[in-house]
Amino acid sequence: MKGLGFLRYAAITGVLAGLVFACACQAPKKAADVAPVFNPTRVLVLPFLKVEPDTAENGVVRSPLTGATFFVRDGISGLGGLSSLDRSLEKNLADWATFEYVPESLAGKVFNAIQRRDMSLSLMEAIKKTGEAFKTDAALVGHLYRFSPRVGGELSAEKPASVAFDLTLVRIKDGQIIWKNSFDETQKSLTENIFNLGEYLDRGIRWYTAEELAGYGMDTLLTRFPWRKQPIKTEKNPE
C-alpha cells in the first residue's frame, strides 16, 4: 500500500510539474503597439464622407475601403456630424501628428473637383489622384455611418446619442491600407453597464450630445495611432 501511495504521489507531482512548465513556456498575452513599417512624412487629410444605409441590407452598411460592417438603424441626422468629426480630427493632428499634413479644408476641394471631373473614378482612384496632386505619401480617410442625436436633456434622455465612424490610412503609391480603426457606440446609462464607471468619472455623469460622443470617440480611436508624438515627461516640482 505504501508503494502504491508513493507511486500516486509521484504521478501527481509529475503532472503538476508539467503544468507549471507548460505555463512558464507560454508567453503572456497582452496588447502591444506594433511599430509601423511605413512612416509617412506628408499626409492628405480628407473631409469625413457620409455613408448612407442601403435599405436592401436591413440597415447594415459596409466601409467602402475596409469592408467592415456597421448597424445604422437611425442613419445620419443632418451634416453636423461630418463637420464635428473634421474639427475633432484636425485638433488631434495639430497636437500630436509626427507628419506634415494637408488639411481637409484644402484637400476636400481638390478631391471633390477630381471626382466631378471624372465620375467613373472609384473612391480609391480619387484618393490616389488627390494624394498625387499634393505629393503626399498617404491619405487619412474617415467615413461616418451613424450620427443619431440625443433626445432629451443631459440629466434625463428619452433616447441616447449614438455614433459610428472609422478612420483609414491609405498609402498613395499602391492604395494599400496601412492602418484602420473605428468607433461604434450608443451611450448606456451607468445602471446598464457598471463597467462604464471610469468613463463616466472622466467625462461626467450625464447624457452626452452626439457631438460630445463623437469627440470622445475620436480621442479614444486615436490613442493608439502609430504616428503620434510621445508626451514629454517632466519632473514634478517637490512639494
Image (cartoon, rainbow, N blue to C red):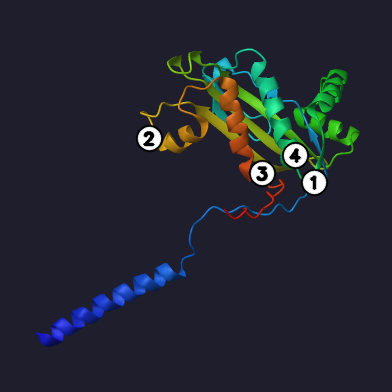
Left or right of 80, for residue 192: left
Q: Which residue is mark 4?
A: 170
4 or 1: tag closer to the N-terminus: 1
Secondary structure at numbered mark 2: helix
Q: Position of residue 188 (x, y in %)?
A: 43, 26
Residue 155 screen position, x and y as percent? 44, 18
Residue 93, horizontal then vertical, whole percent: 73, 37
Q: Which residue is mark 1?
A: 40
Image vertical order of residue 21 relative to residue 232, above or below: below
Residue wearing tag 3 = 225
**Residue type at numbered disc 3:** Phe
Between 96 and 236, the one lying in front of the other is 236
Of 181 and 201, nearer the camera is 201
Please, what is the three-letter code of the amino acid marked with disc 4? Val
- Would you place residue 216 above or below residue 227 in this image? above
Mark 4 or mark 2, which has the lower sequence index? 4
